Amino acid sequence: MEVRSQKMVIQLYDTTLRDGTQREGISLSVNDKLKIVRKLDELGVHYVEGGWPGSNPKDAEFFARVKGIQLEQAVITAFGSTRRADVLVQDDPNIRALLEAETRAVAIFGKSWDLHVIQVLGTTLEENLEMIADSVSYLKGRGREVIYDAEHFFDGYKADPAYALRTLQMAERAGAECLVLCDTNGGTLPSQLVAIIEEMKKVTSTPLGIHAHNDGDLAVANSLAAVQAGVVHVQGTINGYGERCGNANLCSIIPNLKLKLGHDCISDEQLRQLSSVSRYVSELANLAHDAHLPYVGHSAFVHKGGMHVNALVKCEESYQHVDPALVGNHKRVVVSELSGKSNIAYKIEEFGLDLSISPEQARQVLQQIKDLENRGFQFEGAEASLELLIRRTQPGYKPPFELIDFHVLVESRQGRGMLAEVAIKVRVGDEVTHTAAEGNGPVNALDLAVRKALLPFYPQLTEIHLTDYKVRILDSEAGTAAQVRVLIDSTWGSRTWSTVGSSTDIIEASWQALADSLEYGLLNGLGV
Amino acid sequence: MEVRSQKMVIQLYDTTLRDGTQREGISLSVNDKLKIVRKLDELGVHYVEGGWPGSNPKDAEFFARVKGIQLEQAVITAFGSTRRADVLVQDDPNIRALLEAETRAVAIFGKSWDLHVIQVLGTTLEENLEMIADSVSYLKGRGREVIYDAEHFFDGYKADPAYALRTLQMAERAGAECLVLCDTNGGTLPSQLVAIIEEMKKVTSTPLGIHAHNDGDLAVANSLAAVQAGVVHVQGTINGYGERCGNANLCSIIPNLKLKLGHDCISDEQLRQLSSVSRYVSELANLAHDAHLPYVGHSAFVHKGGMHVNALVKCEESYQHVDPALVGNHKRVVVSELSGKSNIAYKIEEFGLDLSISPEQARQVLQQIKDLENRGFQFEGAEASLELLIRRTQPGYKPPFELIDFHVLVESRQGRGMLAEVAIKVRVGDEVTHTAAEGNGPVNALDLAVRKALLPFYPQLTEIHLTDYKVRILDSEAGTAAQVRVLIDSTWGSRTWSTVGSSTDIIEASWQALADSLEYGLLNGLGV
């Protein structure tokens, strides 16, 4: 059963930064957007749609700043609509903003569906055709590569095929480089979509693109079916982020194109970055990474049932459709009883700790991990805390400092804003220091106070920085009395480490993670 | 572009209770399973696979208890494998457990892929054929309706078409009522799948079924393509729960079958239960309901961009592929920095607020939303805070209480554990109350203190509960000085509402969300 299609080069067009941000709950800062641009360029995406400069000032700022970034291959693209009805194209503020973005390529969308032209735009079918022609040729005349997005193309075609086709032809004659057929409402079935694309191929020679939404749970299937029907340009977003049920997920489309259909789009090396890019974007978008995402999810290659695990040991491909390493993922086995002791020995070696541990001690460490995980700690993402836990079980372990006590005061007094103040007492060797600091909130005040107390003993702490502070509510149904987990990332130069704390009191959980971060840095001679 | 397929009756086979529970993180009690059976029966599903009685005692208990439940139409089905190699079928414990489940129908899976037969089972290709024949005919002989699941059928066919076909023929000749082709590893493309089904139709007259997994993000597409190719029995799970990337999602398949392909499977009335069944199952499985699920997700018909909202007001179908009421869902409009004035007017009507707002006031509200979102607030998930924001712009608005000031003390004293204490001063009308409380962490103490202060004036507050408290760090690179967003969900009876706060100080952000929660409850007469 060979798939009957020739090997083609497919253009990948990412719209995470524009259509992706239409997802409920996403908001990306300009800095986040610029970071994502760099990642997408590394991944090998051909076009990155940066935003709609005519619609909001944040997107205009993005285009001003993105010019300063050196990219390998990604073409930054500005998005906008065709000119308004009854306005000269050169006077249309949206078209002007598109030009001012100064990108090599622009994508403009126009209406294909008579219902939208008449009822939504409130203009005539003829004027809409002029709007498309004017806008494409004006932008072409100013040296832009023009990608024409035919909004609602499939719905428009179902309603009035002749008119939908005329809108495409206007864009084609005006010089559009690519005609992107959009399933804007996401309800088209692959069989309908392919039939319409086949019709289009008879009447246009311009390269065709596909822009699919997932309202029928078919966005990836529609994108692949379009490629199998001859489309050469695929739009989508990382993790399928997008309005309503999302856009077509590039993290599924790319491996399907490369591994299943044999089409060229990104290199094998770039494909191995896919899982990491997927997690990176979810991190910046501040969304939990969906463990069940095809190819890139944490659970995509997990094996739970004993029978499957048993089969996998005999033969890797028995329950895996591809080798997870190809997309930078890995298989996991969830076993009820971990061979835990060898696990601890493995970790000691991995940490490079110069200590030997007896089987009995290993059992105790495991028990302690279990108890702490029951109380909300998690050591998977906090290996520095795990190293400290192991070290502390060793006889004669001496910590570089000890907390005696602290108090935190947060005040809101009429007209004075918030005040956060911490007093702290710590012991280093035989000396006790008692000091205080104010901060930007109680956790920041605690951070500043403990550093102030330790600095005379450990000046290297000025070189150690906290780079990430995450809070997760574990049993959120317990309301304000919920258990809280705090994860802190720290750095010194290129070295980074992560620590964890957990308590019903966020101040206490933060203290635990913070103290572990500093203790780990000091023990490992960092900062000097 | 009519879809070229005749109207057919499609059998729906739900395996949420068996394959669905293979998802990492799901575990259903027997009581939960029995509740889900009732719901699936009401929904009109034809077969409900209850579990694998030979594999664990919990599933055996389920089958004992499910006999006592009166069902409208769903056929409870027990699942198991063909007999083991070199064992008489009547002596096979798995086959005996299947019979002891005393269900009208049984589903048994057998191997189609030579690699599995030889490497995993460690038996011969001939013996595997005997195992299939023996098991099907033995169960048929005991009066069972036998559904034969051809595990890895598509992978097996790709490896050795003749052998895969022989396994199916053994099941057919032994009397299986339905031959279910399984894409067990989930990596088959619709085009491959359809080509293989077309081959099968030439050589068998027994009804065919499809069982798809989502490893290629194509499970729903594969299920629909199979139906379009003539398959009449579709297996899947509610919300697509299942191992790795999940099973085919019945909540997408059912409306696609009915609304897009016009096939009969459940009634229109039952289809209107779909969103509620989807939420019900996620609730019992103790998983957050995925808001972006097609058809049934909370965000499936949400509209964020100002242009889309503007169009929707003019014409409902402009940005919706189906009427959400058909699947028991509804459209929502959210307000964000991407919104326009029409969103605000829409919201005022949706909230049922008895106030008129001028275009200038709407502009001011939008500006305020934008400013607050810049400072980390987000109103999409906190509509009660949005309502308060709109109300507060009205001249003469009087809040039910006002904060004068508070202070929070968190202490860690040697050997005494943590202490969190709050003192608070609030004004209600002309009266000022000054009180204090201790709590389980500072936010809990604040919650208890403000309630203590307000209770004499508003005894109904004892009826208002916080059910969820979420914290999100927004710019986590700022370390402990990061901006924090707090979201609080509150309930009174079946009514729930959400509020938001944002600050670099988690105490202040929590206070804002908490105060909004109580103010909203009091203004809307809740708790009495």
Image (cartoon, coloured by chain):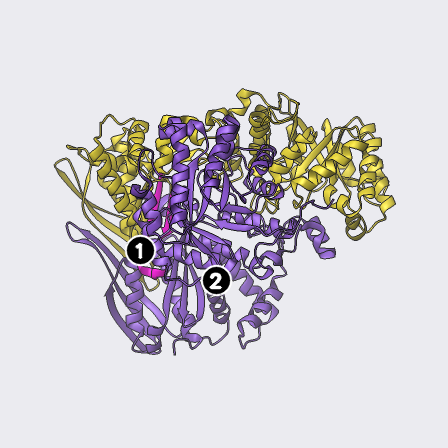
Chain colours: A purple, B yellow
> Which stretch is magenta?
B469-492
Q: Is residue B124 left or right of residue B180?
A: right
What residue is disc 2 on? Answer: A72
Task: Name which residue type carries label 1.
Answer: Leu
Q: Which mark is residue B128?
A: none
What is the quadrant of the C terminus of chain A in the image?
bottom left
What is the quadrant of the N terminus of chain A in the image?
top right
Q: Is residue A357 visible?
A: yes
Q: Is residue B457 visible?
A: no
How many residues crowd mark 2 within 10 Å: few (<14), some (14–19), many (20+)?
Answer: few
Q: Is residue A125 left or right of residue B284?
A: left
Towards the viewer: B505 or B165: B165
Asked if the stretch drawn in magenta spans residue B483, the answer is: yes
- Where's residue A212, x and y in %? 51, 40
Q: Could you say which quadrant of the image residue B504 lies in?
A: bottom left
- The disc numbered 1 marks a residue on which chain? B
Q: Could you say which quadrant of the image residue A438 lies in?
A: bottom left
